[in-house]
Image (tube, helix red, strand yellow):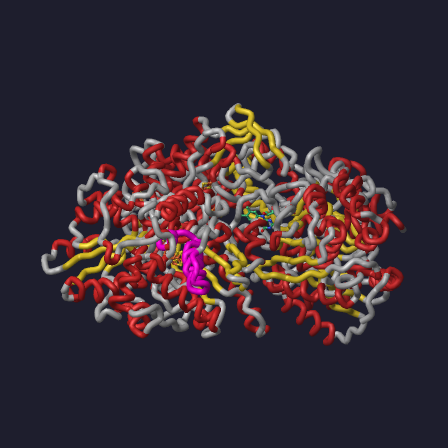
Amino acid sequence: MTKLNREGLAKLRAEAKSAWQARATGTGAQIIIGMGTCGIAAGAAKAWAAFEDEIAKNKLTDVQVLQTGCMGLCYSEPTVEVRVPDMPPIIYGKVDAEVARRIVRKHIVGKLLINDHIYDRPAVDAFAEKAAGKK
Amino acid sequence: MAFKNYILVCSGSNCDVKRAAAVHDALLKEVRDQGVENEVQVLKSGSCMALGQCPGVKILPEETLYVNVQPEDAATIITQHLKQGRPVARLLFDRTQTSKYFPPDVTTVHQKQLRIVLRNCGVIDPEKIEEYIARDGYAALEKALFQMKPDAVIDELKKSGLRGRGGGGFPTWQKWLFTKKVAADQKYIICNADEGDPGAYMDRSTLEGDPHSVLEAMTIAGYTVGASQGFIYIRAEYPLAINRLNLAIKQARERGLLGKGILGSGFDFDIELRLGAGAFVCGEETALITSIEGNRGMPSPRPPYPAVKGLWEKPTVINNVETWAAIPVILLKGGDWFGKIGTATSKGTKVFALTGKVNNCGLIEVPMGITLREIIYEIGGGMLNGKAFKAVQTGGPSGGVITKDHLDMPIDYESLAKLGSIMGSGGMIVMDEDDCMVDVSKFYLEFTVDESCGKCAPCRIGGRTLYNLVDKISKGKGTLDDVEQIRTIGLAMRKASLCGLGQTAPNPAISTLKYFETEYLAHINEKKCPAGKCRDLLTFYILPDKCIGCTLCARRCPVSCISGDRRQVHVIDTVKCIKCGECYQACKFGAVSRT
Amino acid sequence: MKNIKFEINGKAVTVKEGTTILKAAQKVNIKVPTLCFHPDLPAWAACGICVVKAEGSGKMLRACSTPVEEGMKILTHDPEIIQVRRTVIELILSTHPNDCLQCPRNLNCELQRLAAEFGVRELPFEQRLRNLPVDNTTGSIVLNPEKCVLCGRCAKVCQQMQNVWALEFIGRGEKTRIAPAADVSLGESPCIKCGQCSAHCPVGAIYEKDETREVFRALQNPDMHCVVQIAPAVRVAVGEAFGFEPGTLLTGKTYAALRQMGFKAIFDTNFGADLTIMEEASEFVERFARGHGELPLITSCCPAWVDYMEKFAPDMVPNFSSAKSPHEMVGVMAKTYYAKKMGLDPKKIFMVSIMPCTAKKYEVGRSKDMFSSGQQDVDISLTTRELARMIKSAGIDFANLPDDETCDSILGNYTGAGTIFGATGGVMEAALRTAYHMVTHKELEDVNFMAVRGLDGVKEATINIEGKEIRIAVAHWMCNIETVLDRVRAAKKANGEPAYHFIEVMACRGGCVGGGGQPYGADDEVRRKRAAGLYKDDRECGARCSHQNPQVQQIYTDFLGSPLSQQAHHYLHNKYQAKPLYRK
Ligand SMILES: Cc1cc2nc3c(=O)[nH]c(=O)nc-3n(C[C@H](O)[C@H](O)[C@H](O)COP(=O)(O)O)c2cc1C
Ligand code: SF4
Ligand code: SF4
Ligand code: SF4
Ligand code: SF4
Ligand code: SF4
Ligand code: SF4
Ligand code: FES
C-alpha cells in the first residue's frame, strides 16, 4: 500500500467522508453491532450470525452488517444500532438471536420498531456535533 | 412504508412501570382515536429515558424528550406536537440545566454525557482506518506536524488544562515539557494500558473501540518531545484490544502514518506493544518501565521521574489511554474549547465505568463538575430495585466512599480528594443499603494485599495486618483497639509506602471508618452487621406466624438443617446453619428472617 | 555541579545538586534512621523507615532516595514522623522471629538496634511468621529467609555489585522472599560464595556458616596439633569487633589471642602470600619473558573469583595462574614441610585459617588439589567475624593483649608484599616487585606502585621494566570484571597483542579488606582505612618484596627446590575446569 503524504491523506479523507455520508443517505440499511469484549461476552457474535441468517432468509440484498466498539450501554449488551433509510437510527439492547431475527423482519422489512429493546443514545460526541454544525 | 413518527415510552425495569404503562396505553388510544395509527408507532422502549423524571416520552425522529408525562397529556402530545408540529413546552426536558456542562458549540445533549475520549467508540468500525479518518482521524497529527511547533502543541495542552487520567491527575503539558527539555539521544513514549482496578474497563473499551486515537496521540507526543519510539503496555488479558491495536498499527504503518517520514515529513515514529502479565502494580509507571525492560515489576523511588529518566534511563512520556485519546480532539478543537468544559481545576470530560447497584451500568463519559446525583439517578437510571443509596466508591481500591451527604458535590480531582477518596482511573461502584461498609473495605483490602508487590514493609506487612483486622471485625471478633490499630497502620501505610498502591490501600478502610464508624461499632459492640452482609454475624430463623410449612426452604438448604413436616412450622438448626441465605431467598412468604 | 540551598530542621544547608536528604542530614549531624539503605548501593527505598516531611507536601519523602531541591524545608523528626517510623518497625517485627538470643546477629543487628532506639516494648500487631526453611547448602553462607526483612541489599549486591544473580526476590506481596535464583538451593545456584550478601545483610538472614565449635573441639582434643594462620586483611579489621578504629593494625594482639586459645603454632597467610608471589611471578615471567603460556596471566588467589571464572568465564582457564591461594599454600606446607621439620604426623595436624572471606570455606574442599598433603590441607577456614566471637567466648581481653607477640616464623615471617595481598591491587603490586627482580635481577628503588591502589573498580596501568611495557589491569567487585574480560576476548579474537599482560581480580570491593567475612559495617571509608592499615604494615616491614623473605628462601632450599619446580607444582599449584552455572 502506498504511504500517504498530506495530499494523499486529504484525498483519502474526502473519500472516506463521502463513504461515511453515503451510509447515512444511501438506500441500504445497516446493522451495526457493538463488538467490544462486553458485547461479545453477552452474545454479540450469536446475534451477528442470526442477523446474517435472517437477512439471507428474507433475501435482502441491501443490508450491511457492520461492527463497532462498545457503545457504553453495558447493562443492555449486546447492543446493535439499526439504520434504515427514512427511519430514525435506533439502538437496540439485549439483542439475542431471537431479537435479531425480529429486527430484520419487523424493523428492516416492516419498518416498525421493536418494543422493549430500544435504548437511548448515550451521548453526543464532539465530532458528530462539529459535522452537524457544518451542515 | 416507514412511519412519520415513533413515540417511545419509558419502560425500563427501573421505570415507574404503572404510570409508564398508563401513559403508553393513553398514547396508543389517542393515536387510534385521532386516526394516525398508520403514521405513528407507539412503543415501549427498553430503558428509562427520563433522567430521573420518569415517565418519559420520546418522539422520533426529532428526539424530543418529554418528562413527567401523565396519561392526560397524551392527547396534547398527539394533537399539538404530531399534528401541529409545536412541541409541548411544559413537558419538555429542561436542557438548559444539562447543557451548562457542555461547550457552546455542542447543542444536542443526550443523557448528560459528552463524548470526547469515546467519540468514536460505538460509532466507527475500529478495524477500519478509513472510518477513523472519515471522522477527522489523523487530522490532529497532520496539523501538529505541518502547522505547529512542538512548543505550540504543549501550549495547546496547557490551555486545555488536561490532567492525567490514570489516577494521578498530573498536568499532561508539564510532563511533556519536562521530557522535551531534557537533552537525550533517545526518548520514549509509553501508553499505560495496564488497567487493573477491579471493575474498571474504560481503557479496554477505548482501545477496542478506537485504537487509532491512541496511536495518533502518541505520534503527536513523539513529535512534540523528540521521541521516535513508542510502546503500549497492555495487559495480556485484553486479547481483543491487543488484536485491534496490532491491526491498527499495521494499517497505520501501511499508510505511512507510522514509520519513517510520517506523511512525507521528516519525522519518524513507530509503536510496539508490550504485554503485561496482569500484575496491578505494573500499572504504576516505574514498575511498568522496569517490566518493559524485562525485570521484575517493582516500583522504584521517584525522583528521578520518567520524564527525566524513564525507559532504559531515557526521558519518557507515560500517559494513560484516556489521556491519550483526548489529545487529538484538543489539538483539533483547541485547548480553549476543552478548557471550557469542567471545573476550575479539572477540565474536560472523564470516563467512568459505572457499576454496582444502579440500573444502567455502563461506560459513561461526563463533563467534570457533574454531580454524583446526576450520574447515579439520571445517567445511571437510579438505584437497582429501588433500594436506598448508601455510598459510592470512586478510585477503586485506592479510593474511598462518598456518602449521600455529598451527592451534590461537583466531581473533580480536588473535591474527591477532600472527601478522602480520589478520582482514580474511573471506576465508580454504587452501593446500597445491603452493602456492608466493613465488607466493602475488606473486599478492597483483599485486592491490594493480593496485588502488593512486596517491596516495602508498610504495604507488604501492613496491608495484610489491616485486612486481618477488618476481617476480624466482620466476624464479630473485633475490639475498639482494633479500630485504633487500623488507624495507626493506615497512617503508616499512607506515609511510608513507596508507591501509590500501598499509599492508598488503606483509603477504603479509613474512609468507611470515617463515614460509617457506627457500622463498624455495631459489628464490634453488638456483634451485628446492620446491612446483613457479614455472614458470621447473621442468624437465620423462621417466623412461626408466617411459615405455612411449604418445605421449600428445607429443600433448598444445602446442609439440610431445616426441619418440619409439611404444613407445619419449620425450624432452623442454627448450630448447623452455614448462613448461605438460600432459605431466605427461597421463602415466598417472608417467613425466613435474619438478624 | 550546582549547589542547592535548603533547610533541614530549620538549619540552612548547602549541598551539591543530587545529594539526598539522608546525606545532607548526615552532613549536619542529624540522624535519620534507615534500614534498607546501604551506602554501597543505590537506594532501593523499600523499608520506609527513613521518611521525613517536606513543608508544603502532605506526603512523606524517603530521605535515602530523595534528592534535595532548592528551597525545600525538611523536617526529620516530629511526633507523627516518629509514630510512622515506629509503626513500620513494629510491622516488620510482627513478621520477624523474636529470637535474638539465638541469632547470629544478636547485639550486632540493625533491626535490633532500631527496635532498641525506638524503645519498642511490646508487639502490638498480630504476629505472623512465615516458617521458611533455612538453606545451608553452600557450606559457606547460610540463608535464613525467616529472619529476612526484605531490604533487598543482598539481591542488589549479588546482582549489581557481583553480577552473579544468585539471589532474587521470589513471590509477591506478603509471600515475597529472598531466594536463590530459579528457587533452587543456594548450593545449586550460581553463587560464588563471596559472602558479600552476608556482609551487607542488616539482620541475621544471611550469614557465614559458623564453624567455631569445630575449632574449639579440635583445640580440646589432646591428640590434635592445632595450628592457625591469619590472612592479611584480618589484622586490620578484627579490632573493629573490640572497639578499635577500622584499619588499626593488630597483628600482635591477634597472634596473642590465638596462642591463648591454645594453638600450638601461629602461622601467617602473609608468608603464604610471599610464596604465592614466588610462584606466580615466576609464572608471569615464564609467559611474559619466555613466551610459555597464554597472556594475560590472571591471578587466582580469590576463590570466589575462581568459582566465577569456572562458571561464567571458563574460556579464561588457560590464562589463570595455577598457583594456589596463600592460605592453601600455608596449609599444605604445614602438613608437609612443617610436619617433617617437627616430626609430626600430618594427620594429627589441624590447620585453621582465619580469613576475611566466606569463599575460603568452600575453597578448602574445592578440588582434590586441596588435599595435596595427603589429607585436606586446610581443615577449617574461619571468617574474621567468627574469630572475634571465638576471642570473646574464650574470655580473652583482646584490647589489653600485648602488641609484640610474634608468630612461628617458619611459616609466618612475611614481607610487605605479602601483607598488601589483602587490598585490591596488592597482589599485582607484590608480583610486580618480584617480577621486576626476576627479569632484571635488580631491586626496585621505589617499590610503591600507586596506580594499582585505591577503590576505582578497574585500574589500568602500563609498567615499564627495562624498556618492556607491561599492561596491567586490576579489577575488584565482580561487576567490574566483564569489561576487562571482554577486552581480553576481543584481543584474543583479533589474534593480536593481548589486551593486557597481567590481571588481578578480587571478588570483593576493596579486595579482601572488604571481604564477605569481615566485621559488619564496611563502607568505602572503612575499606580505605583497612587498606591504609595494610600499606602501613607494608611500609614498616623490613623487607618489602617476597623474594627477600628469608623463610621463603629457606623453604625453597630445604623443600621445594625452586619456583615452578616439580615439587612446587605438586604442592603449590592447582587446576581449573568449566562448571555449569546451575548444579543439579
Ligand atoms: C498501583 C498503581 C497502579 C496504576 N495503574 C495504572 C494503570 O493501570 N493505568 C494507568 O494509566 N495508570 C496507572 N497508574 C498511574 C501511573 O503510575 C501513572 O501515573 C500514569 O500512567 C500516568 O499517566 P497519566 O498522567 O496520563 O495519568 C497506577 C499507579 C499505581 C500506583
Ligand atoms: S507500596 Fe506496595 S506495591 Fe508499592 S512498592 Fe511498596 S509493596 Fe510494592
Ligand atoms: S441459611 Fe443456608 S444453611 Fe442456613 S438454614 Fe438457610 S439454607 Fe440452610
Ligand atoms: S535478626 Fe536481629 S532482630 Fe532478628 S532475631 Fe536476629 S538479632 Fe534479633
Ligand atoms: S555469596 Fe556472593 S554470589 Fe553468593 S549469593 Fe552472596 S553475594 Fe551472591
Ligand atoms: S537476606 Fe538480609 S540483605 Fe537480603 S533482603 Fe533479607 S534482610 Fe536484606
Ligand atoms: S576478595 Fe578476598 S575476601 Fe573476597 S572473596 Fe576474594 S579472597 Fe575472599
Ligand atoms: S532507608 Fe530509606 S526506605 Fe529504607
Q: Main secondary structure of the magenta part?
A: helix
As for residue C435 lying within the magenta part, the answer is yes
Q: Residue at x 29, y 70 (%)?
A: C561
Give the residues drawn in magenta, as a range: C418-443
Q: Residue at x 54, y 39 (%)?
A: C66
Name the image quarter holding residue A118.
Answer: bottom right
Q: Position of residue B555 (x, y in %)?
A: 36, 58
As for residue B39 lying within the magenta part, the answer is no
- Image height of C147 relative to C312, above or below: above
Q: Position of residue B571 (x, y in %)?
A: 30, 49
* Relative to C501, C134 lies left or right: left
Locate ligand 4 by image quadrant. Answer: top left
Along the line of sight, which residue is nearer the eye, B8 or B200?
B200
Along the line of sight, which residue is nearer the eye, C317 or C74?
C317
Could you tell me which quadrant the N terminus of chain B lies in?
A: bottom right
| Any part of residue A113 in sight | no
